[in-house]
Amino acid sequence: MLREEILNELFKMQDIKYRDFQVKLIPSKTVDDMIGVRTPELKKYAKELLKREDIGEFLEILPHEYFDEDQLHAFIISGIKDYDKCMSEVIRFLPYVDNWATCDQLSPKVFKKNRTELLKQIKKWIKSKETYTVRFAIGMLMGHFLDEDFDIKYPEMVAKIRSDEYYINMMIAWYFATALAKQYDVILPFIEEKKMDIWTHNKAIQKSVESNRITSEQKEYLKSLKIR
């Protein structure tokens, strides 16, 4: 069985100290959920597995038992070069993503060249009731639609999101901090007009102030916009 082969390899790469450190960063996981394979090793192994004709067997096994399998799964999908195949695997995998780390590691390279089609899917994901599907949608807008394909409609989509989920609100804040660095004049009114909830508003300002990509003058003005 391919999964047994993969698990054997993952346990060969196990780093117990790394596992014990990593589990502290992901509240939803315990040491029993983790093997403890470092990210560079997982990425390297994912590239090897992508060359195998039978890799689909592993991708079909959901949900996985271990966090490291989810991470490996994300890296494998991220390397698929055919857009339709990649998107199909992302759609199948997303409902099983249950932590911020796997969500943020899922970053298909092929999406960059297929942004028009990607945007159609983002608009569906962003309305999802699943925490990490929404977080992933915001991440895709942040990664692919803040530069040449930027449109004011995109931050408007993000600003309208209301959630009690920490990992969604943190991604909204991260999105606006990044957007301020890239599209300051257009994004600033979202802060000035307080278009987000108080916590997310203040967190976006905090992350912007911590950034090296905006000026000292901009940082001082943003600080004055914090909601006390």
Image: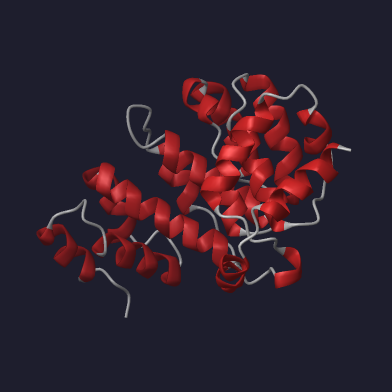
Which residue is found at the position 60% from the left and 50% from the top? 103
Residue 154 visible here: no
Which one is in front, 63 or 171? 63
Of all residues shown, which one is farthest toward the left? 217
Q: Quadrant of residue 222?
A: bottom left
Which residue is found at the position 62% from the left and 55% from the top? 37
Residue 68 visible here: yes
Q: Reply above or below: 170 against 94.
A: below
Q: How many discs appear? A: 0
Q: Reply above or below: 214 against 207.
A: above
Of all residues shown, which one is farthest toward the bottom? 228
Of all residues shown, which one is farthest toward the right? 1
Which residue is found at the position 80% from the left and 26% from the top? 54
Which one is in front, 189 or 80? 80
Q: In which quarter of the image is the N terminus?
A: top right
Query: Could you tell me residue 26's position as x and y percent?
Result: 60, 67
Which residue is found at the position 33% from the left and 27% from the top? 148
In this figure, which colouring scheme has been used for the structure?
A: secondary structure
Query: Could you tell me residue 117's position as x and y percent?
Result: 57, 23
Query: Could you tell me residue 30's position as x and y percent?
Result: 71, 72
Q: Reply above or below: 27 against 14.
A: below
- Side of 2 where 126 appears, left or right: left
Query: Could you tell me residue 184's position as x and y percent?
Result: 23, 47
- Side of 160 where 121 appears, left or right: right
Q: In which quarter of the image is the C terminus?
A: bottom left
